[in-house]
């Protein structure tokens, strides 16, 4: 079974969720490790070998599952909030804020998850999970692009989300207000850059050079 996309009819779906939540709670103290997985299994009084059956890839498998579940929940929340009808800057803000505020989990567990994904053996997985997160956000935001913009939008959102996530992990402000202010600044920077690109393309000299190449 692909842990990224457990089928709705999966008879173990509820138990898998409970175990994933228990591992995330243990990860605050033990990191995303075999120790955390065993402790979570004991806390749920699971039979011997049950945790390994549910997550055969171990802690990395659990982290992958938790990330995919958070993506699905973020998409559902964005759709419920009508994110696709908002202005583009508000779509981005809503997506990132929902992902962090509701679905990133406990900060220390998230921090330790990033540490696990930063290991050389897990770098490719970390990039894959980041891509899936921003792709899900853009999908819920109503993005239908199929040209080069498809990739540039995801690269931009990946940069905004990643930097805001790191800021959030260390933010001690009331209600995370410092994080949301930081997010607004990052979005402002992106919007100014996109406007600058559009202005450059609109310069008469640039249009002439483009036409001369035809």
Image: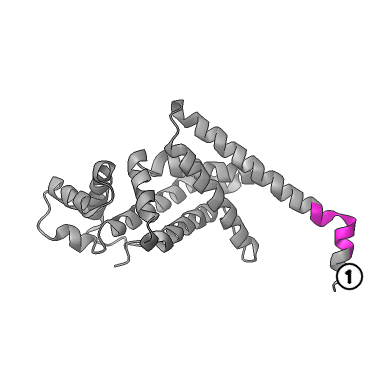
Comparing 8 with 126, the one in front is 126
Magenta: main secondary structure: helix
Comparing 4 with 173, the one in front is 173
The spot of residue 80 in percent (x, y) is 48, 45
Quadrant containing the C terminus in the rendered view: bottom right
* Residue 81 seen by the camera: no
**Residue at 65% across, 43% down:** 189
Q: How many marks?
A: 1
**Residue at 70% across, 50% down:** 194
**Position of 192 compared to 37: left or right?**
right
Displayed quadrant of residue 187: top right
The spot of residue 137 in percent (x, y) is 51, 52
Comparing 167 with 81, the one in front is 167
Displayed quadrant of residue 16: bottom left
Mark 1 neighbour class, 10 Å CA radius: few under 14, some 14 to 19, many 20 or more: few
**Residue at 16% across, 52% down:** 38
The spot of residue 86 in percent (x, y) is 61, 44
Q: Residue 123 lies in magenta, yes or no?
A: no
Where is mark 1, residue-wise?
A: 212
**Position of 24 compared to 156: left or right?**
left
């Amino acid at each position: 079974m692909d842990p990224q996309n457990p089928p709705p009819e999966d008879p173990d779906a509820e138990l898998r969720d409970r175990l994933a939540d228990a591992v995330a709670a243990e990860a605050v103290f033990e990191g995303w490790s075999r120790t955390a997985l065993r402790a979570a299994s004991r806390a749920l009084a699971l039979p011997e070998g049950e945790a390994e059956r549910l997550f055969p890839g171990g802690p990395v498998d659990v982290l992958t599952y938790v990330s995919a579940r958070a993506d699905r929940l973020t998409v559902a929340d964005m759709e419920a909030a009508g994110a696709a009808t908002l202005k583009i800057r508000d779509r981005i803000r809503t997506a990132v804020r929902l992902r962090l505020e509701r679905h990133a989990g406990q900060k220390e567990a998230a921090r330790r998850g990033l540490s696990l994904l930063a290991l050389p053996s897990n770098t490719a997985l970390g990039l894959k999970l980041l891509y899936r997160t921003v792709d899900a956000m853009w999908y819920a935001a109503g993005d239908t692009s199929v040209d080069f913009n498809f990739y540039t939008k995801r690269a931009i959102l990946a940069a905004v989300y990643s930097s805001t996530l790191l800021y959030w992990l260390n933010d001690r402000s009331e209600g995370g207000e410092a994080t949301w202010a930081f997010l607004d600044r990052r979005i402002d920077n992106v919007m100014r850059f996109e406007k600058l690109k559009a202005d450059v393309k609109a310069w008469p000299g640039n249009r002439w050079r483009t036409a001369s190449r035809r």
